[in-house]
Amino acid sequence: MVLNHAHKYKDKKMATSTDVATVRLQTYLNLPLVQRCKEIALLIDESSTTELQHVFPALIDSLFGITDNMGWGLHNISLKKYPQEYEALCVFLSPQGPVFSLCYKLLPDCYLKYNFPVSFLPGKIRSMLEEGIIPPFYFDKIRDEQSTRAPSALCMNPFEYYIFHFAYHLTNPWLQLQQQENVWINWETVYVQLAHSYLYHFLPRDHSPVLPIIGPYVKKTPQRKLLQSPDSKSHRLQMPRLLRSSILNPASQTPQTGVSQQQCLPQVWRSETVVQVFLDFWLEYTEDQSPSQLNTTYATSLPQRHSIHSGEHIRLVRAFIKTLHEFANSTIGDKSAMDELKRIILPSVQGKIYSFLRKAIHHWPLDSSFRLILEAWLSFIQPWRYVPNLEYIKHSKSEDEEKGKIQDETRWISFVANNLLAYTAIFQQLLPRFMRTDLVAPKNALMLFRVTKVFDQPHLANMIKSIESQWTPIVRQQIIDLEGQNYQYVPLFSPTTLSQVSCFLSSIKQAHLTATSLIEALETRRSGRRFLYLLWEFFNGEESSSDDVNMEDRRKVPVFLANAQQQLRNIFQLEDFPQEADSMTADQEYHESILSTSFHHQSQMDFSLDASRPGVFVPRSFDIQKDGRQTSKYIEYLGDPELLPIRSNECALLARYLFKLSTYINEQYETEIGAAFYRPGFIGKICRQILIPPTTVVKLPKRTPNGISPGGEKRLQPRLSLRLLANKSLLSTLGFGIFVSWASNFGIFYFLLLLFMFWFVNIIARATVEPWFQQNQIFRSNNSFERIN
C-alpha cells in the first residue's frame, strides 16, 4: 500500500516536471530570436531526459514551421541583414550545439520514437510505400498500420527526426509559395550555412571521427518481409542502402580485424543517415504536379510544387556533390566502417545525381540562372578537383594551375566509365541549348567557355573514346539502368555529334564577329559623343546596356568565344574550320539592337521608346535566318519602373531608402505634383523635366497562398523618382568632388551649390528645347517601330 503510494507520487512528480519544461519552452518560443536561443539552450542543459521528451517535438515543429508558416526564418536570415540572429542560430543548430545535444540526450532510449508524416517524403518514396515496396533505408522505420494498407508515418529516433525535418525544410512546398520573389537571391542564409556545416561535420575528410563519440545505438527493427514485385528489383538498384547489412549488423564481426561491428556502428550510422536523407529529398527532381495528380493517400493537403528549383536549392546540391567527392577521395584503406562508407558512397548515389542533373538541364529556362545547374554538373564530372590536401599537386607548379587537371588517368577512368552518360549524354544535350542561346551575352559566353575548358583538359577526351570502344558491357548496363531499354546511345565522337559540333562552331564564329563589332562601335561612340551626352553621363553614370552589362564584361566576350572555338576543335580534332565561316559578317540587326539600348533607353536622353518602360532585346529561339543569323526582338518591361530589381551599378541600401522617401512624397503631395506636371508655361516645362510622366503599368496574375491574384492595368500619375541618386558612378563622382573641394579649401558648401547650379542650368536647357525633343521623339518612335517589326 505504501509502496504503491510512493510510485504514484513519483509518477505525478515526473509528470509535473515534464509539464513545467513544456510550459517553459512555450514561453521561450515567444521571445526575440537571440534570447530565445539562449533560454532554450539553458533549458536543454538543465532538464532531464524525461522532461525533454515532449520538449523536443514541440521545438522541431516551431523551428521548421512544417506546414503554413516560415518557422524561425532559416531561409530568410542572412549575416548581412541580421548578424546577431544569424550567429545565434548557427551556434544553436550547429552539429555540436544545443539541439544536437538534445538529440544525443534522448538517443539512448531505443524505444523513444517520433512520427515523421509520410506525406512529407519525396514523391518516389511515397509511391513505393503505397505499392508496398519498402526501400532498405526505410525498412526499420515503418510503423505498422492495422486499418490502412499503407503506413501514415515513419518512426524515427531523435537524430533522424531532426535530419529529416531539416532536409524537408528546403523542399517544403508551403515555403515555396512564400518565397516566390526571392528564389534567386536568397542563398546566403542560415540554412545554407547549416547545411554546409552538417556536410563537413558528418562526412569528415581528415580521418577524424564524427563528434561527439556516442555509445552503441541499438535499433529495434521489426521483422518485416519485403513485398516482391516485378519492379522491386529496379527500385532496389536505384535506391540501395549505402552500407552492406553486414556492416550495419551490430552482431557481426569484421573478419579481417575481428572487431565487433557493435563498435563500428556509432561511427557511420549518422553519416549514412545524412547522405541518404539529403540524397532523397534534395535530388528528387520535382515535376509540375497538382495535388490531384499525386497519390491520394498522402497528398490531399499539399500545395502544388514547381519544377524550377530555387537558387538556394541548386547551390546546396552542388555543395552536396562536392562534399561527396571529397569524402570519397579521402579513403585510406584501413577497412573501417567509415572507410567502407567512403569507398561505396559514389557508386550508391551517382545514378540519382545524373538523373537529377539531366532533368533539371532539360527543363531549365533560357536565362543566365542556368549557370547554377551547369556548375553543379561540372562539379560532378570532375572528381579530381576534390582530392583532400591536393595530394596530386606537383611542387613545381602552382596549385591553381593544376587543381582542375587530371594527373593520373588510371585513377579516374573507372569513375568516368561508370558515369559515362553524365559526360556524353549531357554534353550532347547542351549543344542545341547553346545554339539557341545569345552567345554575345557575357554570362552565356563564360558558361560555354567553362564547359569546353573542362572537356579540353588532358586525358579526358581520350578516356571517353577508350571507354566508348572498350568498356561496352559496363556502358550498356549503365544505359539500361538510367535511361531504359529503348534509349539510343549516340557516341560522343560519332559522325552525328561531329556534324553538330561543326554547325555550332559556325554559330560561335558568328557571335565572335558580332561581339567584336559591338565593342568597336561602343568604343567609337564613346570617344565621339557630343558634349550634351557627356554632361548627362556625368549626372547619371557611365552608360550600360539594357541588360546591365558594362564595357569591361563586353570586352571579355571575344576572348571567351575564341577560346571556346579552339577548345572544341581540340576536343573533336577538327583541324579544318567550316568554309562558310570565311564569308561570315557580324549580325547587324543584333548589333543595332544592342546599340539602340546601350545608352538611349537607360539614360532617357533619347526618347525613341518610352523610357519609363525599360526593356531588353532577346534572341528569338526559333527565328533563325538562312544565313545562320539569329534575330532579336524588344521585350518591354510593363511593370512599375520603380520596382525594377536593384542593378549592379546602384547602391542597394540607398536605393531602398530613396524609394521609401519618394513614395512618401508622392503619396503626401499627389495633387500638387500632378498640378505642377500639367502646368502650362515655362514652369510646367521645368517640372516635366524633373518629374516622371504618367505611365500605364500592367499587373500580371500572381500566385499567392490564397490562389491566383487578378491582373490588370494601372495608371500611375506624375511622380517624383529619386532612384537616380543611388547610382554608384554619381555617388563616386560626388564623393570625389567633395574630397577635392575639402582638400583645396574651396569649401564643401560652395561645391554643392555649384553642382546644384550646374544641374539647374541643365534642367533649364532641357526645358527650353522640350518642343524639339517632342518632335524628335515621334520621328524616332516611328523608325524604331519599323525596325522592330
Image (cartoon, rainbow, N blue to C red):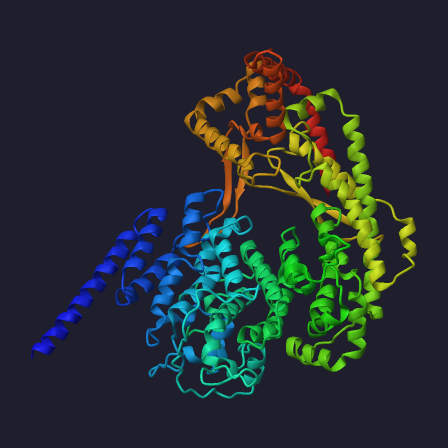
Question: Quick one: quadrant of the N terminus?
Answer: bottom left
Q: Is 383 situated left or right of 472 in this image?
A: left
Q: Is residue 137 visible?
A: yes
Horizontal and vertical percent position of residue 106: 34, 68
Q: Residue 727, relative to residue 412: is it above or below?
A: above
Q: Residue 629, relative to residue 725: is it above or below?
A: below
Q: Is 307 situated left or right of 496 in this image?
A: left
At 64% from the left edge and 79% from the top edge, which residue is drawn?
481
Quarter of the rendering containing residue 686: top right
Q: Foreground: 629 or 196?
A: 196
Q: Is residue 286 visible?
A: no
Quarter of the rendering containing residue 773: top right
Q: Foreground: 281 or 595?
A: 281
Quarter of the rendering containing residue 490: bottom right
Q: How many marks?
A: 0
Q: Residue 389, relative to residue 636: is it above or below?
A: below
Horizontal and vertical percent position of residue 382: 69, 63
Horizontal and vertical percent position of residue 446: 72, 50
Horizontal and vertical percent position of residue 444: 71, 50
Question: Quick one: quadrant of the C terminus?
Answer: top right
At 26% from the left edge and 64% from the top edge, which residue is drawn?
51
Q: Residue 606, relative to residue 291: is it above or below?
A: above
Q: Foreground: 710 or 368?
A: 368
Q: Foreground: 760 or 161?
A: 161
